[in-house]
Amino acid sequence: MTFSLTTWNINSVRLRADAVIRFLREERPDVLCLQETKCTDEQFPLAAFEGLGYDHVALNGQKAYHGVATLSRIPFDDVVRQDFCAVGDARHLSVRLAVGDRKIRVHNLYVPAGGDEPDPQTNPKFKHKLQFVDELRRTDADGEPGVSALLCGDLNIAPYENDVWSHKQLLKIVSHTPVETQGLLTAMTEGRWTDLMRRHIPLDEKIFTWWSYRAKDWEASNRGRRLDHVWGSSSIAEALTAVTVHTPVRGWDRPSDHVPVTATFSL
């Protein structure tokens, strides 16, 4: 049995509902995890997705900011919304679904961007980001007996040298500073997670999932970063068959600055 999961920071689901519909029609992942939906649960455009087969929806929304949503063709239960850092932000959502005989917990996350200055003493946004990543260390891939786990989303950190267009030039830029990259890798290690994108794509190859709106020609300059991730427990990492970064989506009309990433498994 084939199972696929896509993560995508959509940067306003109401503004880009047409893009989501197009993607779902073309790619048909079993589960779609959206981040930065930027709307309350009541404002989420559920009607736009009717008839596409994604009848199971979990939402954790917030007016104008943040927000995550999980759309699934497979029924799920045990919906959990964790309030990281206890500040009331809508940045996490998890569901548990059954694929054949296997149970899978899917975590959908939107880590704070962290502002512009990588100094927690002078920049509260960066301090919040570091606290969030520190709390992420307690999210255990093997925390539920008999349940495999996936963690995906916009984690807003590019941890490896080839996750950015220039390692040297970005070492002091938020998203690739050593304190962030080490924090994320520690959370992954202590949580017993496998980086599924890097399991499938070697570390010596560059991977980008985000290109700034500021670039006049994002494709020509290709100054990207891998801010979007898919992690898995060891039990499901072994079943991974493919990882697809949907780079052409960045060239669609009114695009998000992030592109979807799909992980495919043989279960």
Image: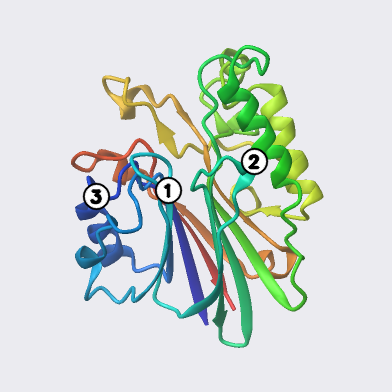
Spot occupied by residue 118 in the image (x, y as percentages of width and height): 61, 17
Question: In which quadrant of the rendered view does residue 187 lie?
Answer: top right
Q: Residue at x 37, y 44 (%)?
A: 247
Say whether residue 236 is left or right of residue 169: right
Mark pair 2, 1: CA separation: 15 Å
Kindly state the secondary structure of the residue where label 2 is placed. Answer: helix
Vertical relation: 138 (above or below) 241:
above
- Callout 2 environment at 10 Å: few (<14), some (14 to 19), or many (20+)? some
Q: Is residue 97 visible?
A: yes
Question: In which quadrant of the rendered view does residue 82 lie?
Answer: bottom right
The residue under label 1 is 67
- Callout 3 environment at 10 Å: few (<14), some (14 to 19), or many (20+)? some
The residue under label 2 is 85
**Considering only order in the chain, which callout, 3 or 2, is on the residue closer to the N terminus?**
3
Spot occupied by residue 74 in the image (x, y as percentages of width and height): 44, 79
Vertical relation: 88 (above or below) 75:
above
Amino acid at pointer 1 = Gly
Q: Residue at x 55, y 53 (%)?
A: 152
Spot occupied by residue 3 in the image (x, y as percentages of width and height): 50, 73
